[in-house]
């Protein structure tokens, strides 16, 4: 059973950076497409960034393009979300999710993912 654990959230000032980690234990992530989602208070959960299992394809929401970068380290069995130039509107709980699929597929639909982490809070405020 795949278990995902997010870390790296916290409080940061506008313009600052954070790197979120999504780590898995006992099961390797290299056959899984991974998505990062976020949910702000009173809002629906939305896709932020996704990476295919072969790392050939990535997706970024328009609101984070040019500021966020998703990457995978198979040796560490971890997927990262580097977040730069953070804005107050990036404040949310961030979740990683995984689905077992090969190839270059990325998914922005929550229903496509079978495994979810517990979330990590990101707060951007001065």
Image: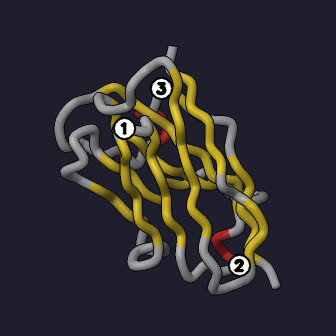
**Residue assigned mark 1:** 75
In which quadrant of the rendered view does residue 77 lie?
top left
Residue neighbourhood size for the residue with mark 1, other residues' Cα within 10 Å, grouped as few (<14), some (14–19), many (≥20): few
Sequence order check: which comes first, mark 2 or mark 3?
A: 2
Residue neighbourhood size for the residue with mark 3, other residues' Cα within 10 Å, grouped as few (<14), some (14–19), many (≥20): few
In which quadrant of the rendered view does residue 70 lie?
bottom left
Q: Secondary structure at mark 3?
A: loop
Question: Which is nearer the eye, 76 or 4?
Answer: 76
| Residue 49 % position (x, y) | 43, 57
Label 2 and label 1: CA atoms lie apart by 33 Å
Give the mark toward the camera: 3 or 1.
1
Residue neighbourhood size for the residue with mark 2, other residues' Cα within 10 Å, grouped as few (<14), some (14–19), many (≥20): some
- Is residue 44 visible to the viewer in this orientation of the structure? no
Sequence order check: which comes first, mark 3 or mark 1?
A: 1
**Residue assigned mark 3:** 114
Q: Quadrant of the C terminus?
A: bottom right
């Amino acid at each position: 059973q795949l278990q995902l654990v997010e870390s790296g959230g916290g409080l940061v000032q506008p313009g600052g950076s954070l790197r979120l980690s999504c780590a898995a234990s006992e099961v390797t992530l290299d056959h899984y497409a991974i998505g990062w989602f976020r949910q702000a208070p009173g809002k629906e959960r939305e896709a932020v960034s996704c990476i295919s299992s072969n790392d050939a394809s990535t997706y970024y929401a328009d609101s984070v393009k040019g500021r966020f970068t998703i990457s995978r380290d198979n040796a560490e069995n971890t997927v990262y979300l580097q977040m730069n130039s953070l804005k107050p509107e990036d404040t949310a709980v961030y979740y990683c999710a995984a689905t077992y699929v090969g190839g270059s597929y990325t998914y922005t639909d929550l229903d496509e993912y079978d495994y979810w982490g517990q979330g990590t809070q990101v707060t951007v405020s001065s």
